Image (spheres, rainbow, N blue to C red):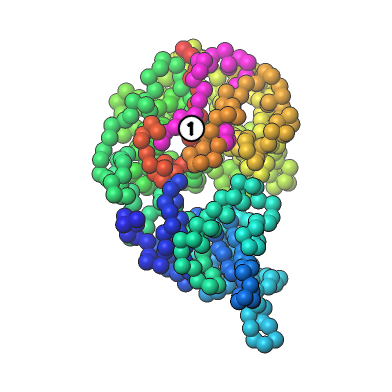
Amino acid sequence: MDDLFWLPPCFNVLSRGDGYISGIISNETELALLLETHSKATYTSYLKWSDHVSKTSNLRQFWHLDDYSEDVPLCVRRRIILVCRHGKAYVKKPKQCPDGAQENVKRKPRRINSKKMNCPAKVFIRHITRYDTFSVKGNASRMRKEDAMRRLKLALSQSDLPTSTFLHVKLPLVEAHQNHDLYPNVMISGYSGGVQSMVEVESSAEVLHVGNGLLLGAFNIKSFGDKKASNTTLMNIISEIVKRYDIILIQEVRDKDLSATKRLMAHVNQGQTEFMYKNIVSEPLGRSSYKERYLFLYRQETVSVVNSYLFDDGCEPCGNDTFSREPFNVMFSSTTGQQQFVLIPQHTSPDFALQEVDALYDVVTDVRRRWSTNNILLLGDFNSDCNYVTASEWNQIRLFTDKSFHWLITNDMDTTVTHTNCAYDRIVVTDESKEGVEPGTAKVFDFQAALNLELELALAVSDHFPVEVSLSD
């Protein structure tokens, strides 16, 4: 662990793997110190032993807070735990017993403006589960319970824990320490002693598309905006992926003024002589202040845009719209055998994936009516697998029950970079468009393997792999 020089001494490293450093710290003060040097800890477990447990008892009780989501930080100030939601903070304080002793009991939280608390932490939680003598309670899955128990037992067996409180923290290696850039403006490279080596490589033969057909891709680049666009290393990798395709749909584009998009276009076209790329992009889409764009990049030598429109899914202010991010449908014309075809992009909201994927059937109907074509492909991050769309729910999706649609990315494929095994990203085609699909070309593109990237660097690019298919000439 000598290469982790940027971690403060108080962080007791337990393990390193799956793109994370796992370890413990003993109190909230040390957490604040850790977050001063590593502000993007995206997973944590907070465990607090019950102070009132009898010294003669072997029973130890503690609370375990599992990961939540990126917009819900766990904030720690002194010895008060704040769970922030939408700019507010819910505060839990210990109860004052009559004899002055502190007893850990739950109280009704009071609200405090989190900004005034000058909250230092950006650690995220999901579920609060109580553990009694290492027996797990709650509605967590069996796998999650077993994994939690392994981590806790490892911490207990290998660490000299304080008697009251410790925090089990997992830090993503992809985040840069504020004083030490882990990926300092280098090309795609391997690791040397834990820090990126300055080794420039040419485009991998496994990345380049060498077929005669038209290769289409859909790629959820996690939170693509100015921050990611300013990282030369990540932009080099993203550009290599983009240049694999004749058309690529990019999702999660968080780019209000299109500055990140302009950087990407400049990066992709830099030094190009044979193939130049253009783009067509939607307006920012979303029901709240959080908005994303759909971005299509395409080779101007092989493809041109014929038409486009944003699907009208209802009145958003009225609350009766269908999609969180309604499809931005684009008709392309190509120099291959597929003269004209329509791409329908969709990045569903995970909480409403079932309803939104089903509603894509109505989008197809609208495209057929408007453009008099059935040469249609639907693609994007549908979130249509694992917990978001379960096996018993597929019969509620018309796009699945109607056998004139063909799901080219199937449930047995894994489109995630992490250890999960889920087919979130999909490509679905109509009968007519299926006739132009080259057999065996619908697949997941593992850019981590193709570019020989460490997991942490691959995750810095995205937690999704692109999905792709080739249309015959």
Residue at the extreme bottom of the image, as rendered:
99
- 44 lies above or below 117: above
Highlighted magenta segment, given as a residue range: 422-448
Q: What's the residue at 40%, 17% (across, down)?
A: 211
Is 77 situated above or below 262?
below
Q: Is residue 304 visible?
A: no
Vertical arrangement, residue 8 with respect to residue 98, above or below: above
55, 36: nearer the viewer: 55
Give how far across and how far down residue 418 sits, in percent: 49, 41
Along the viewing direction, whichever of 56 and 360 lies nearer the viewer: 56
Q: Position of residue 365 (x, y in %)?
A: 69, 24
- Looking at the picture, tell me which residue is in the foreground, 51 or 453: 51
Identify whether 188 is placed above or below 78: above
Number of numbered discs: 1
Residue under pointer 1:
466
In front here: 237 or 146? 146
Residue 356 percent coordinates (x, y): 67, 36
On screen, residue 467 versus residue 136, left or right, reads: left
Q: Residue placed at 70% from the left, 86% from the top?
A: 98
Residue 231 screen position, x and y as percent: 36, 47
371 is within the stretch colored magenta: no
At label 1, the amino acid type is Pro
